[in-house]
Amino acid sequence: MPNSVVDFWHMVVQEESDSIVMLTNTIEKGLNKCEQYWPNDAGQTSSYGDITVSNITVRALAPDETNVRVCLLKVQWKENGREKTREIRHYQWINWPDRGVPPCRLTSMVLLSNIRGTKKPIVVHCSAGIGRTGAIVAIEYILEKLQQGIPCESMDKILKELRNQRPFTIQNDMQYLYVHRVMLFYFIDKYKIFADNEEVMTKYKQFVADYDKVTG
């Protein structure tokens, strides 16, 4: 909403965020999904109330991950009469459809690895803030548990825990299955875990076939 853009930037400044993850386009299927709250092109500068945002550079997330744009933004404001400046990285995933899922690649893993090092709060949003956002948060939630050596609950329990914090997190079956698909792709296709287990691989291939039918 246009009237919330200034408040959005005040929130980013107040919480000292240095990463924004945007999982939507401003317009999708002819509908406004998100306000253009940042300068989109390198060299552009826009003001939002008393906060000025400049787009320094624009690049792809990685050479083979061109569906995520990364803008380096310089944010300037005054605090107690003193000039303040902060650099923020704005990640925009441009091919994840509303209430749908993107192609199953390692895009989510690459994106999350780029922002995981920060100790500041990370801003994540889509359009409604529950579907695409919920899916990417669920993937990171699982990865963090695994990295810390904490046993991971079943997905239904994970979803319940996330929904206790954000009602209606993950909007539909496709997004719920997408989380499973990404994690299986990560472990089986990338790291070849269970590659020698014929029973697991048979079930995995059937799951992939069923998933492709549903999402294709």
Image: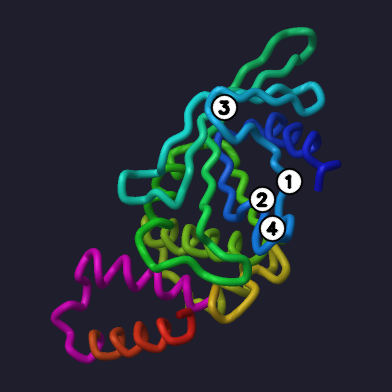
Picture coordinates of residue 48 (x, y %)? 77, 28
* Residue at the spot 61% in from the left edge and 50% down from the top edge: 124
* Residue at disc 3, secondary structure: strand
Q: Is residue 201 above or below residue 58?
A: below
Dots 1, 2 in contact, CB < 8 A:
yes
* Residue at disc 4, secondary structure: loop
The segment highlighted magenta reads 176-200
Upstream in sequence: badge 4 or badge 1:
1
* Residue at disc 2, secondary structure: loop
Which residue is denoted by mark 3 in the rendering? 55
Picture coordinates of residue 137 (x, y %)? 55, 59
- Cα separation, mark 1 vs mark 3, equals 17 Å
Which residue is denoted by mark 1 in the rendering? 35
Magenta stretch encompasses residue 192: yes
Q: Nearer the viewer, mark 4 or mark 2?
A: 2
Residue farthest along the front direction in this orientation:
30
Picture coordinates of residue 192 (x, y %)? 19, 70
* Residue at disc 1, secondary structure: loop
